[in-house]
Image: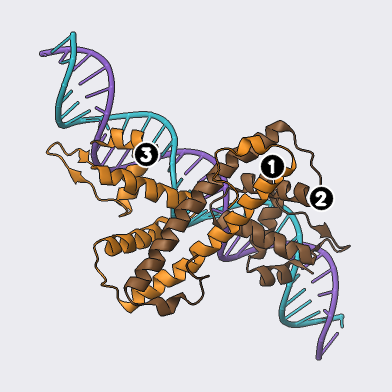
Chain colours: A brown, B orange, C cyan, D purple
DNA sequence: CTAGAGTTTGACACTGGTGTCAAGGTCAAG
DNA sequence: CTTGACCTTGACACCAGTGTCAAACTCTAG
């Protein structure tokens, strides 16, 4: 599939897809035209990247995270201690974000319930 | 307490504290000097704000979220339907971030375990 | 063959969150 | 009273993530 379709399916603009690639977060191969071509896998990847970026993870780290995921997938337990340490460190940052967001989520949810607007909640995955 | 101390206790630079105030995320009253003065409550508040911003929530929304929290705290169930709708919408964004971050967290954790670096995990709250 | 839609690269611009610096006020210690 | 640490505001600057636009190319449909 070409970049337009990928963009449509992920909701991420072509511009950004190219940007992510430029940052080394994505690898696309090229058709004879020079057009980038993508597979199904790329859809997931782009979603993932965009999600992380949206969640405040700088692209530089997104790369580290996803590289780790890839390595895990490939059953490639090659991991120099130094990289592991970096990951561990990033992990605490990620956890902190999760905690903070979770707290907000819960408060919002409680608040909506308290103000009798639970109806608006049907799309979020039930309190725990 | 003055801004310096607040900064020291939250790890957020004075510059940013002022910035947050300017964005309406914080309210500080002033001593006769003109110096901003803060209470214990502000420490928590600043932590919260910084956490959310770090987690990719734009200040404009942080305001909405925290205002809701405040309202909830004050047992002030005054909530025009429109605001509630906005909150509900923001809620799905927050949840999306949480999901994405959680997935990353888990993968990193699994990866570290798989590569025999569990030792580095002692500071994260145990895999569920 | 032509038109129109989609692609490529590259440039410019904007926004939001931050850092840093400058010029001047406040205050406590010596 | 002077000095040094801390505060005030305001400006300038930077980076990352995005949008948008332009010029040129490719392809498909008519």
**Helix, strand or loop for disc 3:** helix
* Chain identity of mark 1: B
Give me the residue at 73% from left, 38% from top: B116
Kindly indicate whether the residue at mark 1 contacts the one at mark 2 (C-beta within 8 angstroms): no
Q: CA distance from mark 2 to mark 1?
A: 14 Å
Residue B112: mark = 1
Residue A74: mark = 2
* Residue depth check, mark 3 versus mark 2: number of the one nearer the observer: 2
**Mark 1 and mark 3 on one chain:** yes
* Chain identity of mark 3: B
Give x and y (percent) for residue A30.
84, 59
Residue B10: mark = 3
Q: Decide: few, some or many residues near mark 3? Use Cα within 10 Å; few <14, some 14-19, many ≥20.
A: some
**Helix, strand or loop for disc 2:** loop
Q: CA distance from mark 3 to mark 2?
A: 41 Å
Residue B17, located in which quarter of the rendered image? top left
* Residue depth check, mark 2 versus mark 1: number of the one nearer the observer: 1
Q: CA distance from mark 1 to mark 3?
A: 30 Å
Residue A54, located in which quarter of the rendered image? bottom right
1 or 3: tag closer to the N-terminus: 3
Furthest residue toward right? A32
Left or right of B33, for residue B22: right
Give x and y (percent) for residue B103.
63, 56
**Mark 3 and mark 2 on one chain:** no
Give me the residue at 42% from left, 80% from top: A119
* Residue depth check, mark 1 versus mark 3: number of the one nearer the observer: 1
Left or right of B37, for residue C10: right
Nearer-the-camera pick, B2 or C26: B2
Q: Decide: few, some or many residues near mark 2? Use Cα within 10 Å; few <14, some 14-19, many ≥20.
A: few
Task: Kindly tell me whether residue A115 is visible in this rendering.
Answer: yes
Nearer-the-camera pick, B119 or A65: B119
């Amino acid at each position: 599939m070409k970049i337009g379709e990928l963009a449509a399916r992920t909701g991420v603009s072509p511009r950004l897809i190219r940007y992510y690639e430029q940052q080394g977060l994505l690898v696309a191969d090229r058709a004879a035209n020079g057009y980038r071509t993508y597979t199904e896998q790329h859809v997931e990847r782009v979603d993932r990247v965009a999600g992380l970026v949206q969640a405040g993870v700088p692209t530089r780290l997104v790369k580290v995270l996803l590289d780790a995921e890839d390595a895990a997938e490939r059953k490639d337990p090659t991991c120099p201690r130094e990289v592991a340490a970096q990951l561990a460190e990033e992990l605490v940052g990620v956890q902190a974000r999760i905690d903070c967001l979770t707290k907000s989520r819960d408060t919002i949810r409680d608040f909506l319930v308290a103000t009798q607007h639970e109806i608006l909640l049907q799309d979020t995955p039930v309190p725990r």
